Image (cartoon, grey):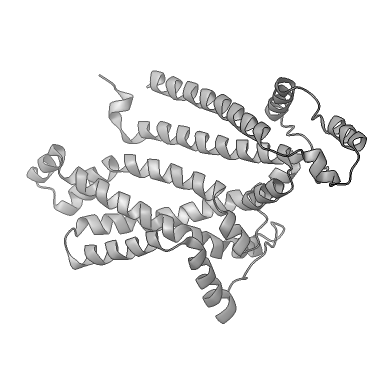
Amino acid sequence: MLRYALTRTASLVASLVVASLVIFIVLEVVPGDPASFMLGLNASPETVAALRTELGLDAGPVARYLAWIGGVFTGDFGTSYAYRTPVAGMILDRLQVSLPLALLALALSTLIALPVGLWAAARRGTATDTGIMAATQLGVALPNFWFAMLLVLVFAVRLHWLPAGGFAGWADPGAALKSLLLPAVALALPQAAILSRVMRAALIETLSEDFIRTARAKGLTRGQALTRHAFRNALIPVLTIIGLQFSFLLAGAIIIENVFFLPGLGRLAFQAISQRDLIVVKSVVLLLVAAVVLVNYLVDLAYLAVDPRLRHPR
């Protein structure tokens, strides 16, 4: 168990180091100069050179990488080229929207998917199972921004129950949650469709194992064997998908954020790219990659709780 955890921790550290190098190198080879972009086409070479010195762009690549990554470890992500404000503060402000949105969407997705997948697996081959699989296939095929516009039309425009967009801020938690509810549902429904299909497939596969037949032979009903034994063993692939979904919900919600005018990390990254604000782009991308790696690390550790073979290897 300890060896498993140490191996995953070493993999986490190595992944973050490699990711930081890749992000820095990729953005270094992107054509265009931030100083020239900020000053415009008519700026004199002397002015551009002075701005490059002020922004620290005239230093060598190694020095810039070390300065950037050293600041990241101390919580100093640098200063935005475009807004001239600390990047850490900008990211923190946007995280107050993106992180609760991702967590709320993931919670809704999981609460919907697990019982639906369990219900479909318990009634495999019936009309109920066929109907659930058809609904989930539709959920996978339809894009989440279409769900978002439909939700706005019904619950904001027609019923006036929830706001159509914007973020009220956490000064009023109730209003903030109302602002996030529709985008969270729009993000959660397609992810719930995927997760429920994975849950059903994992349960059906587990139900064919020998230990399930042994449990049935001891007198357990199919439903009891499903909930007491098969469900826990089927959680391993489900945990993997949940981890990937959280990473997607945190990093890939840019379309939903634009539909609902939410000031999240996705919109910040998009704006920074369009303005050639590379220090913001590097920091946001590194943060998102770190979130993906960290979530996968936590999922690997969660395997210890559901798979006793990892706690007691032979």
Q: In this view of the protein, which residue sits in the foreground, 202 or 5?
A: 202
- Residue at x 68% of width, y 49% of height: 268
- Residue at x 79% of width, y 30% of height: 57
Q: In this view of the protein, which residue sits in the foreground, 186 or 217?
A: 186
Q: Is residue 24 left or right of residue 113?
A: right
Q: Is residue 295 left or right of residue 216?
A: right
Tally of numbered discs: 0
Above/below status of 107 relative to 147: above
Q: Residue furthest bottom?
A: 158
- Residue at x 10% of width, y 40% of height: 214
Q: Is residue 49 left or right of residue 209?
A: right
Task: Please say whether residue 159 is visible from this viewpoint.
Answer: no
Residue 229 percent across, percent down from the top left:
22, 43
The C terminus is located in which quarter? top left
Residue 188 percent across, percent down from the top left:
46, 58
- Residue at x 31% of width, y 54% of height: 197
Quarter occupied by residue 217: top left
Residue 120 percent across, percent down from the top left:
25, 59
Above/below status of 138 relative to 44: below
Above/below status of 276 relative to 153: above
Task: Please say whether residue 108 is visible from this viewpoint.
Answer: yes
